Image (cartoon, rainbow, N blue to C red):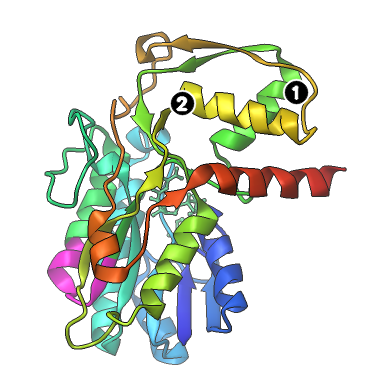
Amino acid sequence: MKILITGAQGQVGSELLKEAHNRKHQVYGFGSTELDITDAGQVLDTLAKIQPEVLINAAAYTAVDKAEQESGLAYAVNSMGSENLAKACQKQNIPLLHISTDYVFDGEKASAYTEADTPNPTGVYGASKLEGDQKIQQIWPKHIIVRVSWVFGEQGNNFVKTMLRLAAQRDELSIVDDQFGAPTSAIAISQCLLDILDADTFNQSQCPWGTYHLQSDPGVTWYEFAGEIFQQAKNLGLITKTMKLNPIPSSEFPTPVKRPANSKLDGIKLQQNFSISPVHWQDDLQHMLKNIRAITS
Ligand SMILES: NC(=O)c1ccc[n+]([C@@H]2O[C@H](COP(=O)([O-])OP(=O)(O)OC[C@H]3O[C@@H](n4cnc5c(N)ncnc54)[C@H](OP(=O)(O)O)[C@@H]3O)[C@@H](O)[C@H]2O)c1
């Protein structure tokens, strides 16, 4: 399949590019300097030139706290950018696959969030992503939006890399233990998106277009996630010491944007419509740490 990927140098975009190549798709990956999704004309021209069969958008403004100061840019990329892509896909009559976030929810729900739950973002990042989702939903019916949570991967900045960096500097860390969610690897997200393209139900006259949640298991707090990272890193010889971890409430680690207390996503709809099962982040974490060990040793 001829696929155009935007945001191809990000955490997810870079893995998507690799995985799509591995699956022998004809892939065109564009970073932000080659294709700026806020530039409607550039988006239209690029699609007209490449003539892809599907567009996957991995581009986004993702700096959750910084977005409070840069709301104009966050909305330009996450809302207007999504709108530009939806209009261009409509013009070309091609499906748009788009990635969204657990941060569209406020985290007040006691159980995992389904697609039927009402979003209520707590900050600019979540609100701008939600507006982007809504633009796509309003403009172009042939869309699949996949909401994911707590992304980690070898490319870019994420919690796993932060923990490994801190382990080189300290012996003891205090980590928030009252925010519950699920880490999801960039590889798992890429595989999910490409599995959707491969599914029998995709792009048929009865294709179940719409919004989906990618469920990752098991659900953990950031404190528990950090514990697993250090345990695995030690088992693999990436670190030699035993890190002392202290669980703390969010009130002791204030951030400009309040994070959802619960942002676990329920993936039953994805399973029912595309036969895509929940993913398991612990195996993907091990894969990532082994690759880091191979690079650094
Ligand atoms: N990271 C998470 O924990 C997380 C959690 C839930 C959902 N998500 C969602 O997952 C998706 C992928 O996120 P990610 O973690 O891969 O983010 P990322 O590593 O920050 O990658 C986003 C990419 O988008 C590009 N970009 C920014 N502005 C652009 C523009 N105007 N035009 C074209 N490209 C632009 C960036 O390029 P530059 O670096 O050159 O600006 C970057 O390469 C996003 O939709 C995000 O909202 C992420």
Question: Against 248, is 109 above or below?
Answer: below
Measured as percent of width and height from the top left, residue 251 is found at 35, 10
Measured as percent of width and height from the top left, residue 107 is found at 23, 31
Question: Against 64, is 195 above or below?
Answer: below
* Secondary structure of the residue carrying numbered label 1: helix
Q: Is mark 2 within 8 Å of ligand 1?
A: no
Q: Is residue 168 left or right of residue 112?
A: right
Q: Three-letter amino acid code at disc 1?
A: Ala
Q: Residue at x 38, y 77 (%)?
A: 197
Q: Which mark is residue 283?
A: none
Residue segment shown in magenta? 135-144
Quadrant (top left, top right, bottom left, bottom right) of the C terminus: top right
Q: In whole angstroms, how far apart are the C-alphas of marks 2 and 1?
A: 19 Å
Question: Against 265, is 207 above or below?
Answer: below
Measured as percent of width and height from the top left, residue 249 is found at 38, 11
- Front residue of 189/252: it is 189
Instruction: Answer with mark 2 or mark 1, whichever residue precedes in sequence.
Output: 1
Q: Residue at x 57, y 49 (%)?
A: 284
**For mark 1, what is the residue?**
168
Query: Quadrant of the rendered structure where residue 205 is?
Result: bottom left
Which residue is situated farthest in the right direction here?
Answer: 297
**For mark 2, what is the residue?**
222
Q: Three-letter amino acid code at disc 2?
A: Trp
* Secondary structure of the residue carrying numbered label 2: helix
- Front residue of 282/177: it is 282
Query: Which-is-in-front pick, marks 2 and 1?
Result: 2
Q: Is residue 158 left or right of residue 257?
A: right
Q: Say if the magenta span includes residue 153.
A: no
Q: Residue at x 44, y 62 (%)?
A: 58
